[in-house]
C-alpha cells in the first residue's frame, strides 16, 4: 500500500509498503502550529480507515516556534482513529527532552516512543501495530 509522497511546507509524508506513515521533516524550515496542522491532515488522509504506525524523522537542527510546545495539536479530534503508535526518530537530545516535556502536558492515547535509529523505530512500530512484515 505504498503512496505517492505528499509535500507540505514542513515535511514530505508518505505511506510505504510496510504500512508505516513516514513524516520526513525538511531541513532549514521553522516548525509552527499551522505547519503541524497541515501534516496532521495529511496523516489523516493517508491513514484512511486504518490505524497505522506513524514515524516522524526529525533533523538534529530542527528549528521551531515555541508555540508548538504549548498547543494541543489534537484538540477537537481523536488521533486514535488514524494512529496506532507514533515513533519519533532524532539524534537530538534536546528535541527528545522537549517532546518529553510536551507529553507531560498533552498526553497521547496511543504509544509514543523516541529513537535515534530508524530501523529500531520500524521494528517497534510493527510490534505495536501487530505486523512483522
Image: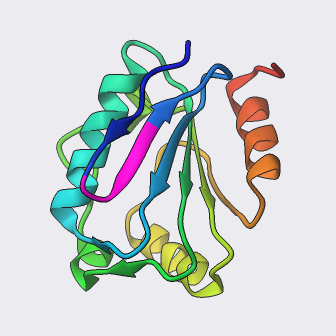
Q: Is residue 38 above or below residue 103?
A: above
Protein image colouring: rainbow
x, y (%) of residue 16?
59, 26
The residue under the point 43% across, 70% down is: 27
Q: Is residue 10 magenta?
A: yes
The residue under the point 24% across, 56% down is: 9
Query: Foreground: 107 or 123?
Result: 123
Dividing the picture into quarters, in which one does residue 129 lie? top right
Dividing the picture into quarters, in which one does residue 127 lie? top right
Magenta: main secondary structure equals: strand
Q: Where is the C terminus found, in terms of image quarters?
A: top right
Residue 78 visible, this angle: no
x, y (%) of residue 35?
22, 58
What is the total number of numbered labels drawn onto the structure image? 0
The residue under the point 78% across, 60% down is: 117
Q: Is residue 129 above or below residue 62?
A: above
x, y (%) of residue 92?
63, 81
Dividing the picture into quarters, in which one does residue 128 lie? top right
Q: Is residue 14 magenta?
A: no
Q: What is the span of residues highlighted in magenta in the rendered image?
A: 9-13
Q: Is residue 115 above or below residue 20?
A: below
In the image, is 108 to the left or to the right of 8? right
Q: Where is the N terminus found, in terms of image quarters?
A: top right
x, y (%) of residue 34?
16, 59
Residue 68 visible, this angle: yes
The residue under the point 37% across, 76% down is: 28
Amino acid at each position: 500500500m505504498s503512496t505517492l509522497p505528499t509535500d507540505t511546507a514542513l515535511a514530505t509524508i508518505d505511506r510505504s509498503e510496510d504500512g508505516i506513515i513516514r513524516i520526513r521533516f525538511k531541513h532549514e524550515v521553522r516548525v509552527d502550529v499551522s505547519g503541524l496542522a497541515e501534516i496532521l491532515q495529511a496523516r489523516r488522509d493517508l491513514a484512511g480507515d486504518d490505524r497505522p504506525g506513524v514515524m516522524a524523522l526529525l533533523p538534529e537542527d530542527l528549528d521551531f516556534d515555541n508555540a508548538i510546545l504549548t498547543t494541543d495539536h489534537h484538540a477537537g479530534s481523536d488521533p486514535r482513529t488514524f494512529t496506532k503508535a507514533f515513533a519519533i526518530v532524532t539524534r537530538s537530545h534536546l528535541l527528545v527532552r522537549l517532546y518529553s516535556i510536551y507529553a507531560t502536558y498533552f498526553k497521547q492515547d496511543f504509544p509514543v516512543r523516541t529513537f535515534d535509529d530508524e530501523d529500531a523505530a520500524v521494528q517497534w512500530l510493527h510490534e505495536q501495530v501487530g505486523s512483522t512484515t
